[in-house]
Amino acid sequence: MDEIQVVVAHSERATLRVGDVFLKVDADRARIDTEVRAMALVPVPTPEVLWRKPPVLAIAAIPGTTLGSLGGPATGSPAAWAAAGAAIRALHDAPLPAWQGRAGRSVAVLAAELDGECELLVANGILPTDLVTRNRRVAEAAFRPWTPAFTHGDLQIAHVFLEGTEVTGIIDWSEAGQGDPLYDLATFTLGHEDHLDDLLAGYGTAVDLDVIRGWWSLRSLLVVRWLAEHGFDPFAPGCEVDVLRARM
């Protein structure tokens, strides 16, 4: 029998690997529904769905490696980063899905969520006031009108696989839907901003870098407390707290 590898596990969901099969267990059936719907629509490589029996989704492993991970060293040539950028652009140019994704929350919803989270970060002594205040100001650049695109919604660097300069698969589509395309670009380069130019070379369109920086701050502020409460370490070198410190 193949060894079972726990890829990620917390109170909301878990992913296990058994040989070349990944088993995703999610307490929220809607996330699995979204993942399957999105993978059927997007014009980029995705894992093969082997079977589905809620709350479990079984998908095949895909070849290749990622360009790194948050908190770890980035790998890959500038051409590989550009290839990732081109794949992201293909996604953003795809016909819009019928539903809103994680990257599609309104400015009013985001601002209210951010204000509440910043208050808790300071009140609970998780982060110093000056760090939160500065990044709250930087985050405001993301609060502007945007044209909806087909977005992944959780496009972490660990979710895109390549062989050389060919994207072989993009995984974890449960947050996909209509949203702000710059959210995806910022998520992919979080903690690896020195590769942003290479990514944008492949993406092929000039973007507002202040908005990208705003999303780096906003995303980091919103997840620090959740990560700490679910067994992850946002204070590890290169992770979310370091991203916030870089804006000081």
Image (tube, rainbow, N blue to C red):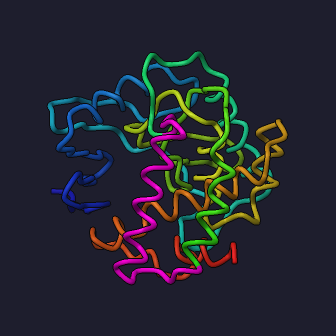
Q: Residue at x 53, y 47 (%)?
A: 155
- x%, y% of residue 241? 53, 76
Q: Which quadrant would residue 21 be assigned to in this image?
A: top left
Residue toward you, 174 or 87: 174
Vertical position of residue 181 compared to residue 185: above or below: above
Looking at the picture, tell me which residue is in the foreground, 52 or 215: 215
Q: How many numbered circles does the render carry?
A: 0
Look at the magenta stretch and give its main secondary structure: helix
Percent of width and height locating residue 48: 38, 31
Name the quarter where the N terminus is drawn.
bottom left
Q: Quadrant of the C terminus?
A: bottom right
Residue ID at (62%, 78%): 245
- Front residue of 182/217: it is 217
Q: Residue at x 15, y 31 (%)?
A: 53
- Specify start and end residues of the magenta stretch as a single range: 103-130
Tell me which residue sits at (54%, 82%) in the image: 237
Q: Does residue 20 belong to the magenta stretch?
A: no
**Quarter of the rendering containing residue 149:** top right
Q: Is residue 24 left or right of residue 151?
A: left
Q: Position of residue 244 (x, y in %)?
A: 60, 72
Q: Is residue 169 rendered to the left or right of residue 164?
A: left
Residue 137 at x, y = what percent?
A: 65, 63
Q: Determine if the magenta segment contains residue 108.
A: yes
